[in-house]
Image: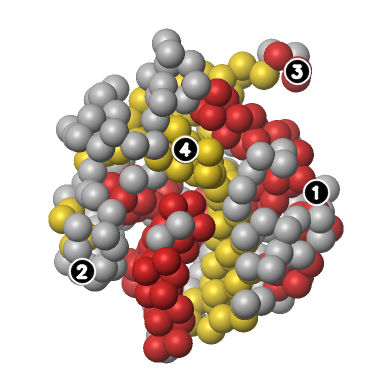
Amino acid sequence: MVFCHVLMSLRMRIYSGSFFIAGLLMISFNLSSQSFKVGHTSMLFVDSSRNNRKIRTEVYYPSDIQGRNAVIAETFPGKFPVICFGHGYQMSWDSYSYLCDSLVPYGFIIAFPKTEMKMFPSHIGFAKDIAFVLSEIDKSGKNPSSFFYNRVDSMNCAMGHSMGGGSAILAARFSSSIRSLALLAPLNTRPSSVDAASGLEIPSMIIAGKNDCITPPEIHQVPIYLNFKSLSKIIITIKGGSHCQMADRSTICKLGESTCKPKPDISDSTQHEIIVKYLLHWLNFHLKGDRSSADQFDSFLESDESIEFVRNN
């Protein structure tokens, strides 16, 4: 199954979910960046400092053709920022295919570490994996024998959902080379990501769900936001949005969500549309320096009745 199948032009996106039919969803992003197809490769990183820990990773990248091991985009000779995404508890990397479909065509490399999917995961282990993968992909961009030689930009982002979001915060404490954080309903991990946030000054965005009954914003995301020391930080709360709808699919997550309240008041596809709209413009500004994306981001915030937000600047 191809999880990152892309059917898009620069101004249109069609989402197709595996467990629901969302219909046609058109989003006008007004981004000026080139539109690419999605290449995909599997990579194995080995961390010798942690007893040769193996970190199997799925990597998606801009290409001129669709598919596995396709050559990285040759029509665009520049470099691409890197995002490392940490999955949620008991969730797989392919639970976030809509993000891959949405971000890679706009010129981002996204890596999904496949570790810590066990019943009792190590948050600190996952955090170190996220930091290590970002470091290794950066090194590969400097290695003439690498698939990504001379195509990796120094700008990057640690990203994640729930457990992966909290672990991304911990990762930024381990690695000073992490340049930004974009978090979907981050969990207060063990050790505490709330505490870890207090030592971070990098640009940070949190997207929360108003109806998240698994990691309620007031217990998890709001304390993280308040502790960030960055001059550029924002928390966007999606009205009616839930925890599990931050992802494409997860039977385990949905089962857990079915036992608590409040329930989501919006559809998966609506929540995805909102997430992608803000992520794309935020990343385009913070990782590529696109001022027009920052202006569009601000315009969305001021007119969007589907969200609430608090920001530092």
Q: CA distance from mark 2 to mark 1?
A: 39 Å
Please say if the residues under marks 4 and 3 sit with CB atoms less than 8 Å apart: no
Instruction: Tell me the mark number nearer the camera, choosing from 1 and 4.
Output: 4
Quadrant holding the C terminus: bottom right
Secondary element at image label 4: strand
Q: Which residue is mark 4?
A: 153
Q: Which residue is mark 2?
A: 26
Amino acid type of the residue tagged 3 in the rendering: Ser
Q: CA distance from mark 1 to mark 4?
A: 31 Å
Residue 181, relative to residue 76: is it above or below? below
Secondary element at image label 3: helix
Please say if the residues under marks 2 and 1 sit with CB atoms less than 8 Å apart: no
Spot occupied by residue 200 in the image (x, y as percentages of width and height): 75, 56
Please tell me which residue is depicted at 22% across the width and 49% down the height of the picture: 35
Amino acid type of the residue tagged 2 in the rendering: Met
> Of 208 and 9, which appears nearest the observer?
9
Q: Which residue is mark 3?
A: 49
Which one is earlier in the sequence, the residue at label 4 or at label 3? 3
> Of 28 and 116, which appears nearest the observer?
28
Spot occupied by residue 9 in the image (x, y as percentages of width and height): 16, 55
Amino acid type of the residue tagged 1 in the rendering: Arg
Please say if the residues under marks 1 and 4 sit with CB atoms less than 8 Å apart: no
Which one is earlier in the sequence, the residue at label 2 or at label 1? 2
Colouring scheme, one of rainbow, by chain, secondary structure, one colour: secondary structure
Residue 161 occupies quadrant: bottom right
Secondary element at image label 1: loop
